[in-house]
Amino acid sequence: MKANDSNVNIIKPGSVIGVLGGGQLGRMMTLSGAAMGYRFITLDPAESSPCGQIAEQIVAGYGDQNAARELASRCDVITYEFENVDADVAALLEKESYVPQGSKLLYTTQHRLREKQALEAAGVPVAPYREVKSAEDMVQAVEELGVPCVLKTVTGGYDGKGQRVIREKQAALTAYEELGGSTTELVLEQFISFTCEISVVAARNPQGEKRTFPPAENIHVNNILHTSIVPARVSSELQLEAQHLASQIAESLQVVGLLAVEMFVTGEGQLYINELAPRPHNSGHYTMEACTTTQFEQHVRAICGLPLADTTLLCPVVMVNVLGEHMEEVTTRLSSPDPLAEELGIVAKLHLYGKDEAKIGRKMGHINLLCHDVQHALMWVEKTNIWRNQNL
Ligand code: AMP
């Protein structure tokens, strides 16, 4: 049965939720959903995936149609924890099961140009951009947008891969060739000289109810999220505006489930939407202890057609990611009393994702630092020296 205004599909506790992808987002979704009485089956090619350790797992590739069919037959509702879901699999699941998020949102957010067009249609600001299909387009686009500007591949880019910042016009064609030239779909964006980056996680259920979490201020190191600071250090008017924009986008795109909205904030207080992710987001992990409802519970509520829950921030928080290179020091430090945390009035909550190999740059877990003042938590991050060489 499909959801519509008069006949919304309510997935009651006790039902089975299928998760495409068995990474940490699926794992934390399972932890929250299990507490609400749901059962989970994940599909992931890696045996004993972070989610598969705590849910049932079908071990198969994401493009495996037979495995997708099995998932569909065993679940009451299906969701995904990453956006690059194979289009054929998404269509198959939609036909054979209940996928309240639908495949249209994936189709939009998998493609930077379609995403920007959808954002413009939603009436929200994006950085000026041009589609680049040829070397002539490239030269003209740089001429029109000026330098600096950022060239990006339209699909497949993540963590800063598939991007080139162009600082002088002469470098335009080199960047164009480096990213694949006419064989790759490209988009050129004006460089936004932002003072900070923030993100808002919005939720919408099939009934059209919407809620947003407080904005997080995000600091990236080597293009990987390093720290999220909440409340974001911007005015309360800007925070409200960011939440309003995220809500407006969720409504315009008829989102069901979560939508993470990344934005740039300029010195003049202007917000530009940079990117969307139709799923729980790393910058929303702070909600796990710091809000009345976590982003994962909210996602389960939204896809199951339950009323959305309150998103109040209970205390200031700093979330810091634990990568492979931080694992040893983090586990040692958090396995014994921490006078520094006590002195600063901080409670450190460690979440680990159950990954065996602590490779450099691999997200192994995160710490939520609950505090009275985010400066104290940032001081803890600095003084522990675990994240050395990563300027905040
Ligand atoms: P993205 O993959 O689009 O999220 O970009 C990765 C990072 O590159 C962003 O978090 C920004 O720090 C930076 N960036 C991307 N696009 C722009 C832009 N138009 N202007 C300035 N910085 C950008």
Image (cartoon, rainbow, N blue to C red):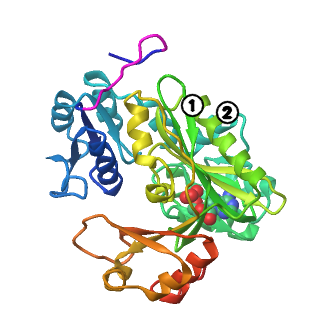
Q: Height in image: 195 above or below 117? A: below
**Residue 6 highlighted magenta (yes or no):** yes
Q: How far apart are marks 2 and 1 (CA)?
A: 8 Å
Disc 2: which residue:
122
In the image, taking residue 168 as reference, residue 344 lies left or right, namely: left
Disc 1: which residue:
253
- Residue drawn 61% across and 71% down? 374
136 vs 186, nearest the viewer: 186
The amino acid sitting under disc 1 is Leu
**Circle 2 — which element?**
loop
In the image, taking residue 389 as reference, residue 323 lies left or right, namely: left
Q: Where is residue 48 in the image (x, y as percent from the top left)?
A: 16, 58
96 vs 154, nearest the viewer: 96
Upstream in the sequence, badge 2 or badge 1?
A: 2
Q: The C terminus is located in which quarter?
A: bottom right
- Residue drawn 49% across and 38% down? 309
Label 2, ligand 1: CB separation under 8 Å: no
Q: Total label count?
A: 2
Contact, CB < 8 Å: mark 2 with mark 1? yes
The amino acid sitting under disc 2 is Ala
Q: What stretch is highlighted in magenta?
A: 5-13
Q: Position of residue 188 (x, y in %)?
A: 66, 54
In the image, taking residue 148 as reference, residue 62 lies left or right, namely: left
Residue 43 in sight here: yes
153 vs 324, nearest the viewer: 324
